[in-house]
Amino acid sequence: MPESQPQTPAQKMIGDFAPKLVSLTDDVLFGDVWERSELSKRDRSLITVAALVAGGNTDQLTGHLARARDNGLTETELKEVIIHLAFYAGWPRAMSAITVAKQVFNG
């Protein structure tokens, strides 16, 4: 990779340890799936945040909450997603997710 290009989050996190997983993340997931026109990036972010909350995957939630805001979701909408999921995905998962959201939204 040329030095002038900034590293992707995946490259920074695991690039030297798992380059194939980085390639799949950058090229397939974000380079192809996220770019498909059948769903808007806003909708993809809403789905992704909901799936991460429901699965209890808070390590990935930080980056996807920021991406969701960049893709047009508001802080209020994202909080509401977490509140709604408390009843479908479980209270502990929602409480963990809202803690992450508070850190993301309050900087």
Image: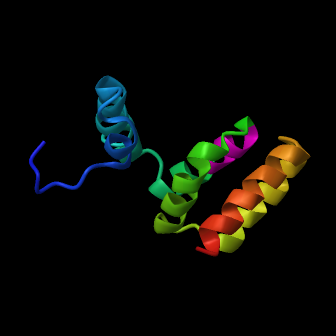
Q: Can residue 48 be spotted in the picture?
A: no
Quadrant (top left/top right/bottom left/bottom right) for the C terminus:
bottom right
Q: Can residue 70 be spotted in the picture?
A: yes
Q: Position of residue 67 (x, y in %)?
A: 48, 59
The residue range painted magenta reads: 49-54
The residue shown at (88%, 42%) is: 90
Asked which colour scheme the image uses, the reply is rainbow
The residue shown at (47%, 48%) is: 39
Tally of numbered tags: 0
The correct choice, above or below, for 26 with respect to 69 in the image is above
The correct choice, above or below, for 11 with respect to 70 in the image is above
Q: Is residue 49 left or right of residue 44?
A: right
Pick whichever, 15 or 27, lies toward us. 15
The residue lying furthest to the front in this view is: 16
Q: Is residue 67 left or right of residue 19?
A: right
The correct choice, above or below, for 85 with respect to 89 in the image is below
Q: Position of residue 3 (x, y in %)?
A: 11, 51
Quadrant (top left/top right/bottom left/bottom right) for the N terminus:
top left
- Reply yes or no: does residue 104 show up in magenta: no
The residue shown at (35%, 28%) is: 17
Q: Position of residue 82 (x, y in %)?
A: 77, 56
The residue shown at (52%, 62%) is: 66
Main secondary structure along the magenta-highlighted residues? helix
Q: Position of residue 92 (x, y in %)?
A: 87, 45
